[in-house]
């Protein structure tokens, strides 16, 4: 029986996935990457799930790619898909919002996992780095792209070119994470945020999250057209009608997700 590398917990409409390879600071082996992708896809296939929280066990979020497995990657054809493309594409395009809950270090692919999520909560012990240059490589799971979008070119280049870690305060001030709380409140805050997302009209949230994600990928004029289409689609939902009616009636809306 292969060891379980990802634990799954259900908290209402939120699924919490915990990287559970503490002996290697949750370093991403091929086995862990494959198991995490499967758990994410299972969560997204459940219509009752409205958000996914990604977190790490023990003192680390994730120390990045398992360095012992990197030599197996050398010589790969430039046309090959990388063994972790499926995981990061799944995180970045999941049907429901993804929230990274970070305590301890998120280095390399671990930092890239945080960046692939829709938002993130950090504890005061959190540290972020893209130290790939110190291994003679560069980030390969979106770090050179998403980090610039998250913190801006100057701060991204400081991290990318030096590989030096930044602390939780710096990450929060730079916009790499949305919330900074005490370590023992990280999961609580992530679940609270997930609950707030689930409480809103789920379809409208899906439109909003999809638009926010596309904003990362599309030139502005295409992003605005995408937002306009989603806005008109959202207007046509019964949730939008219920939201307007509830405001008028001074009552809490009863959203159905349709
Ligand atoms: C690249 C393809 C690989 C194919 C496999 C598929 C996985 C795909 C992953 C997706 C991302 C790929 C793209 C990404 O951009 C590339 C990377 O992420 S490269 C790796 C970047 N990470 C690092 O460089 C961090 C390396 N670790 C450290 O610098 C230090 O461990 C630390 C994080 C600063 C912590 O230091 P300490 O607190 O002193 O702890 P230790 O060093 O003693 O570590 C404890 C224990 O954990 C083991 N370990 C730590 N990090 C890794 C790691 N990245 N890979 C494997 N093992 C790791 C360390 O060896 C210790 O184990 P022990 O020796 O006690 O058995």
Image (cartoon, helix red, strand yellow):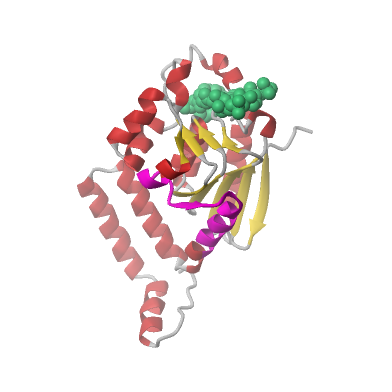
Which residue reaches farthest bottom? Answer: 249
Q: Look at 50% across and 13% down and name the residue there.
A: 74
Q: Position of residue 146 (x, y in %)?
A: 37, 37
- Ligand 1 placement by image quarter: top right
Q: Position of residue 29 (x, y in %)?
A: 61, 27
Question: Is residue 82 visible in the rendered structure shown here?
Answer: no
Q: Nearer the viewer, residue 218 or 150?
A: 150
Q: Nearer the viewer, residue 63 or 46?
A: 63
Q: Main secondary structure of the magenta part?
A: helix
In the picture shown, does residue 93 fall above or below 165? below
Which residue reaches farthest top? Answer: 75
Q: Nearer the viewer, residue 193 or 92?
A: 193
Asked if residue 179 lies in the magenta stretch, the reply is yes
Q: Quadrant of residue 20?
A: top right
Q: Quadrant of the N terminus?
A: top right
Q: Report the number of numbered marks.
A: 0
Q: Look at 33% across and 64% down and name the residue there.
A: 233
Left or right relative to 212: residue 140: right
Q: Look at 30% across and 39% down and name the residue there.
A: 152
Q: Look at 35% across and 52% down and name the residue there.
A: 212
Question: Is residue 252 visible in the rendered structure shown here?
Answer: yes
Q: Position of residue 147 (x, y in %)?
A: 37, 36
Magenta range is 172-195
Q: Nearer the viewer, residue 127 or 34?
A: 127
Left or right relative to 1: residue 45: left
In the picture shown, does residue 75 fall above or below 63? above
Q: Quadrant of residue 14?
A: bottom right
């Amino acid at each position: 029986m292969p060891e379980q590398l990802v634990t799954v917990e259900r908290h209402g409409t939120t699924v919490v996935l915990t990287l559970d390879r503490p002996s290697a600071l949750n370093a991403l082996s091929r086995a862990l990457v494959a198991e995490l992708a499967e758990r994410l896809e299972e969560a997204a296939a459940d219509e009752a799930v409205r958000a996914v929280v990604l977190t790490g066990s023990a003192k680390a979020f994730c120390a990045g790619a398992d360095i012992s497995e990197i030599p197996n990657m050398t010589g790969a054809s430039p046309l090959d898909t990388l063994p972790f493309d499926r995981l990061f594409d799944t995180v970045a395009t999941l049907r429901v919002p993804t929230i990274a809950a970070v305590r301890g270090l998120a280095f390399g692919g671990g930092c890239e996992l945080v960046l692939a999520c829709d938002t993130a909560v950090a504890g005061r012990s959190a540290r972020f780095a893209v130290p790939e240059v110190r291994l003679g490589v560069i980030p390969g799971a979106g770090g050179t792209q998403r980090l610039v979008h998250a913190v801006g070119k100057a701060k991204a280049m400081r991290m990318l070119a030096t590989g030096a870690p930044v602390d939780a305060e710096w990450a929060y001030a730079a916009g790499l994470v949305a919330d900074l709380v005490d370590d023992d409140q990280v999961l609580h805050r992530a679940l609270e945020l997930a609950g707030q997302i689930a409480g809103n009209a789920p379809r409208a949230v899906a439109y909003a999250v999809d638009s926010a994600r596309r904003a990362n990928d599309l030139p502005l004029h295409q992003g605005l057209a995408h937002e306009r289409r989603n806005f008109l689609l959202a207007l046509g939902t019964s949730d939008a009608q219920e939201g307007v009616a509830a405001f008028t009636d001074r009552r809490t809306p009863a959203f159905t997700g349709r």
